[in-house]
């Protein structure tokens, strides 16, 4: 086996391993946004599908786009005002199911942005799952998307 063939075989093996590992959890329809050009924080939203036979949990997220990245949700407070809360235990991703990270609900919060997020930009975001491990996605910045765009619709 030549050196070139060995390198090609090694690259192919690593590619298949990464694809198989990431195939357990699929992240689609991702986007990030900020409220204004001067914003110091932003959020990322996406659809996470667990195609395995066992439950998983999104436990962390990381990105060079912000000094601090946390998993957040919205919850109605005692006075009826919605509050944003850090969800330290993360989000359950049930076996064979989909979990939406969407505006007004669960999302990835980007605090202390390291650069402005302009429409058309993209950020790298690493999602950390208990079982599936790390999945890195490139998330486009979309400042024009409507709140319910991409949300799953359930009609009876």
Image (cartoon, rainbow, N blue to C red):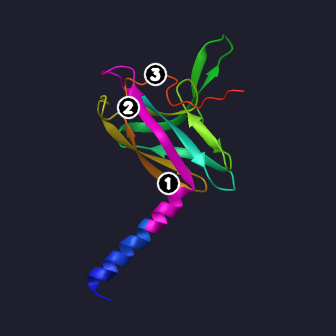
Percent across and percent down for residue 117 are: 32, 30
First-in-chain label (2 vs 3) = 2
Percent across and percent down for residue 94 are: 68, 46
Which quarter of the rendering shows the C terminus? top right
Q: Provide the secondary structure element on which disc 1 rests.
A: strand
What label sits on residue 146 in the rendered view?
3
According to the image, label 1 marks what residue? 134
> In which quadrant of the rendered view does residue 4 lie?
bottom left
Q: Which residues are magenta?
A: 16-41
- Tell us which disc is closer to us: 2 or 3: 3
Query: Going by the image, does 22 lie left or right of 97?
Result: left
Residue at the image point whose x is 29% and y is 29% from the top: 116
> In which quadrant of the rendered view does residue 151 lie?
top right
Percent across and percent down for residue 66 are: 38, 37
First-in-chain label (2 vs 1) = 2
- Is 131 located above or below residue 76 in the figure? below
Task: Pick the residue in front: 55 or 60.
Answer: 55
Q: Is residue 30 in the magenta section? A: yes
- Tell us which disc is closer to us: 2 or 1: 1
């Amino acid at each position: 086996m030549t050196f070139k063939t060995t390198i090609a075989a090694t690259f192919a093996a690593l590619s298949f391993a990464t694809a198989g590992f990431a195939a357990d959890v699929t992240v689609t329809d991702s986007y990030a946004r900020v409220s204004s050009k001067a914003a110091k924080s932003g959020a990322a939203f996406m659809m996470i599908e667990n195609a395995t036979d066992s439950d998983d949990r999104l436990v962390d997220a990381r990105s060079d786009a912000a000094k601090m990245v946390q998993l957040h949700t919205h919850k109605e407070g005692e006075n009826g005002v919605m509050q944003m809360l850090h969800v330290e235990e993360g989000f359950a991703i049930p076996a064979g199911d989909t979990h939406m990270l969407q505006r007004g609900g669960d999302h990835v919060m980007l605090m202390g942005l390291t650069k402005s997020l302009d429409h058309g930009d993209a950020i790298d975001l690493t999602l950390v799952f208990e079982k599936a491990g790390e999945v890195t996605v490139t998330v486009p910045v979309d400042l024009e998307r409507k709140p319910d765009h991409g949300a799953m619709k359930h009609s009876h």
